[in-house]
Image: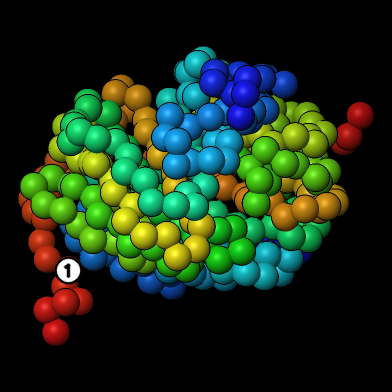
Amino acid sequence: MAKPEDLGKLGGLVKLKNLRHESNLVELKGWKSAHKSISLPMITAMGERDIPGSQLVIGFAYIDQPEEKIGIKAHIHPDRDQWIFLFGARDFTEFDADVEFYLDDEWHKIDYPFYAYIPKGMSHEPLRITRVGKPLIFIDARVEADKQPPVWIEEKPRK
Amino acid sequence: MAGMEKLKNVVREPNVVELKPWKSIHKEIKEPMITSLGGFDVPDNVMSMGFARITEPVCMGSPTHKHPHDQWIYLIGEADSFDKLDADIEMTLGDKVVKINYPCYVFIPKNVMHCPLDVKRVGKPFIFIDARVTEEASVRPEKVAKHVPVKYIANPRKKK
C-alpha cells in the first residue's frame, strides 16, 4: 500500500522518460507505480510535459491483485476535472473484481466495468480493490494540470 | 456481436457509468469495444474515450480529415505489457506520414489534418484508444500560444 509520503513521488514523473519522436508523437516508456501491488510497468502520457498544448494527462496500470488504497486519501481538485476507468484487462467488459470507490462524499460498491467522471470540486478517492478474480486495467485521466493544490478531506465512514 | 450495434452505457450512480460493449464499424475489429461518451453519458463531461483490441491489420479514420477539437490516439501493448508494441503502423499527421512500431500516443491538435491510421502488421494484439475533448475544452492555456507552431520533423533517433 502506498503511504502519504509516496504522494511526493508523483513528482517522480520527472523520472519517466517518455521519448518525443516527432512534434506530436511520443513513445510511452514503462515506469514503476508507487503501489507495490502494481508490479508490472505503468505507462503515463504527461500532457504538456511531453508536448506543449497537449492537455490530456493519462496513466494506465495493470491490476492483478487487491490494493487497499489507490489515491491514498480523499480529496478535491478545486479547478480541474478527472476521470477514473476500471475494466477487464483481456476482455474489456468482463469484470471479476470487487471495488469500493469514495465519490461525492460516499462509498460506492462497484462490480461492473465503469468510469467515473469527477468534476472539479467533487470529493473522490481512495479506490479500494478488495478482490481481483481477473486482471483489470486502471486509468486515471485529467485534461489540465492543477492550478491549485488538491484539498485533502476526511472520509465519511461507510454506511 | 448481435445486439451490440448501438452503445448503451448505463449511468449506475451519479457520475459512475457502466461501460457496455458495442461493435466496431471495422469488420477487422472482432472483439467488443467500450467507449465513454462524454456529455451523452453525464452532463458537462467534456471527454470521450474509446477502447478497441486490435488483432489484425485494419485501416481506420479514412479519409484524411480534421475537426475543431483536440484528439489523442494511444497505441499500447496489452494490459500486462503496456510498454511493448509488436505492430507496424503508418499514420498521416499534418503533412507527413509517420511510421510507428513502439507504444505511443499521437496528439492531434484541433484543425490539424490526420489519418488514415493504417495498421499494416500485428505481431501481437494491442490496444487502440481514441480520446477527444469537446470543442469548448480544446482551449489551450495562454502560455502555449506563445510556442512556435509545431513542425513535423524527422525522427531524431534516425539522424545518428
Q: Position of residue B104 (x, y in %)?
A: 37, 59
Residue occupying the point 33% across, 62% down = B88
Camera-nearest residue between A130 and A148: A130
Q: Is A118 situated left or right of B54 in this image?
A: right
Residue B108 % position (x, y): 25, 42
- Asked if residue A49 is positioned above or below residue A94 in the image, the reply reads below
Q: Residue at x 91, y 29 (%)?
A: A159
Q: Is residue A46 visible?
A: no
- Identify whether B35 is placed above or below A51: above
Residue type, label 1: Asn
Residue B27 in sight in this render: yes
- Chain bearing mark 1: B
Please identify the residue farthest to the right as the structure is shown: A159
Identify the residue position indicated by label 1 in the image. B155
* Picture quadrant where residue A18 is located: bottom left
Where residue B72 sits: x, y (%)?
34, 43
Left or right relative to A132: residue A149: left
Q: How is the image coloured?
A: rainbow
